Amino acid sequence: MLAEPAGGTDQPAGRTAHELDIPPLRGDGVTRGDGAVQADSAVQASGAVQAVAVISGGVAGPAPDTRETTGSRGAVDMLAVVVVSLLAVAVQAVLWERFRQPLWYDELWRPHFVAEPPGTFWSELSVANTPSAIGSMGLLRVCGDVFGWHAWALRLPSAVPLVALAAGTWLLARRLTGRTAAFTAALTVTLGGTVVDLASQVKPYTLDATCALAVVMLWMRAASTTRALLWSRFAVGVLALFSLPAVFLIVPLTVVDVARPLRGAYGWAGRRTAARPAARRAFRPTVRAAVRAALCDAPAAVIAGLHAALFVLHQSGQRASTFWDDHFLAGRGLPDGIRFIADQLAATAAGAPPGIDRYDPNLVHPLTDSSDPAVIVLDCAVAITFLAGVVTLARRPDGRVLLVATGGAELMVLAASAGRYWPFGAVRTNVFLVPLLTVVAAAGAAALARTARVAWAGAGVAGRPGDGPSSGDPAGGRAAGWRRTAAGLLAAVTAVTVLAAAAVPAAAVSALHPLWEERGDRRPIDLMVDATVTARRLHRPGDLVVVGGRLARAGWLYGMEVSQDGASDDRTPGQDAAGQSTAGQDAPAANTAGQGPTRQDAPGQERPGGPGADVVTGPVGPRVPRSSTVFLTAIGDGGVGRALTRRAPGPEGRVLLFVLAYDRRGTGHALDEARAVGWCPAWTHDFELTGTLRVLTPCGHRADNAG
């Protein structure tokens, strides 16, 4: 089906109340001496009626100034696009230090899988932490190959889409509502601290949100011919290759397009008239229209479906993980399931912007999240404005596209959570819905603001002296008073709701404060590249590297085989815990045949040095091949002993044992296993928040290896 023509939302000057779906003032009225029209008693009730009609009529904005030409409106809108785009660039420039920080755990695994050679790419991908779209992985690979495998370069595919996200949010909102609401929506999304935080990491969520906007806007796009429509749907399918959750938008949009022609034939009206000859004659044209709609939407649906079936499902090995259990519908009974859905929808509404992640402790969050009263106020205000937006946009063809995409995607995500494929609720994987939810709420807030103005104006007209019924009609006077009170109350309640909703942009921007304060802070497992650089300095032919930890493998392989960053903690030896200089005596010699670590530990005792004391200096050796490395998913369960028994280094060899921070609890047992087969710790260095690297030497030869 062809989409409705695109167009602005400002109503042309001179439109009548009927054209605006606002009931005209009833009654003839009386012209007063000042030229104004005095309303009769029936007019006094019109304020509240018109106020409700503003929402239900779907009016997008007040009539523009007749002096503003179409060209000037276009220039203003283009200027707004430039402004919000520059804001997106500026906020990232201010936080540039964030982009220069080393990759942490949640980022490390993505470039590892992306950089895998063709021979091992497919098998490695099956154990990916979370699924990724083939296009987003391609962008990451291009940035690494072109700019180098540096942290800042790998974050470009997340940072650049924030600029497009800002412009896209403005364009979509401006199409459906006025400038003020559109600009507010764009600022809420662009300057939301949590969104900016995600844009500074190697994660696809800002790209997903940008692609979601593009999908909706392309679906709204007018197509003059069937060929143009097919190309538009093909473009949507291409977007699905770059954004995994785009399929959640495409499926409901396709279903609605196909079902729209069939609604008359198979709906309730069709059932009542199925026996009539006219209905039977219309059946075939209706089916042909539905088939045509399906064929036109097929490029998008087929590309997205094949991508999901052939590439995405291959990455679903983490369904067995318990990480997202709190956001899966799977395994819940009916009462618990209903409560789960209600809780997640409430958390979604209370986000700033709506739908943003509110659970990840490694992301910054708005300051309002720490106040239960503030959360409740935002929750109620956004819920009301969102419902008002639904009512407003449902009367517009392009508005219905946005509503179908947003509501359908929520249902698709909920269904996927029932199969443990995708978490439901206000979590980072659903950031693609943030701009859509924000635009709907912004349109509703604008409609409510107009409602308040109309209701207040109605109460004012009814309250002017001489405008009410004559003093000889006390019943009419009481009725007018009640109507005046109702109009004023409606105006007040609506105004309070709009003011509360206006706090959402401020709450979203408030998350920039902790982001600025923490711009240089450490994150979990962010010194993995340092650990691999140190291991390369220590490693010499014949050594065996043992890496332990359930989550260590991908990060270690990225740091060892791919990363072109140096160690971020590349310091010279400093002082030990006693404050004595350790220069030249504490750091083990690297890549020097016949010389081992100089740090001596008593059997069974660990002595990590003070700040900088154990950081190895000197040239970085070659990358340790994967064949010289043993990976253990658990520490302390006998794996270290078995590995050293099967693959013990030669007479001059040593063991480099790295244990991830999350698995340190089993370190004592692992060292006991190593001692049982003749290997004792000789040197230790702790990488804060990341793990511990130890050099193990044969227990009987430790004195021989002392420097």
Image (tube, grey):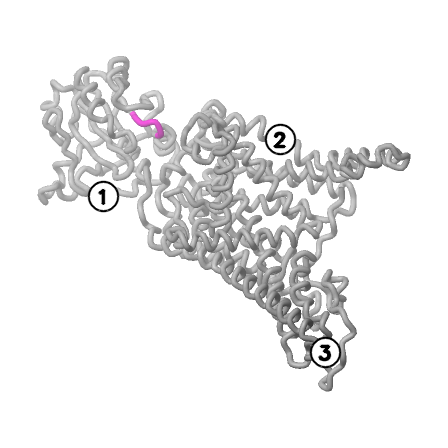
Q: Residue farthest to the top?
A: 646
What crowding class fits label 3: few (fewer than 14 Cα within 10 Å), some (14-19), or many (20 or more)?
many
Label 1 secondary element: loop
Q: Mark 2 and mark 1: span between their CA atoms?
A: 51 Å
Count of numbered circles in the view = 3
Q: Amino acid at mark 2?
A: Gly
Determine contact: label 2, label 3, CB under 8 Å: no
Identify which residue is drawn at 56% across, 55% down: 385
Label 3 secondary element: strand
Horizontal side, residue 173 vs residue 694: left or right: right
Snapshot quadrant of residue 277: top right
Across and down, in percent, residue 465 comes to 65, 81
Across and down, in percent, residue 138 comes to 52, 36
Across and down, in percent, residue 568 comes to 30, 43
Residue at image mark 2: 305
Residue at image mark 3: 38
Identify which residue is drawn at 41% across, 29% down: 322
Which numbered disc, 2 or 3, marks the residue closer to the eye?
A: 3
**Residue 590 versus residue 458 in the image, above or below:** above
Snapshot quadrant of residue 107: top left
What crowding class fits label 2: few (fewer than 14 Cα within 10 Å), some (14-19), or many (20 or more)?
some
Identify which residue is drawn at 38% across, 53% down: 371
Determine contact: label 3, label 1, CB under 8 Å: no
Which numbered disc, 2 or 1, marks the residue closer to the eye?
A: 2
**Image quarter of the N terminus:** top right
Which mark is drawn over residue 571?
Answer: 1
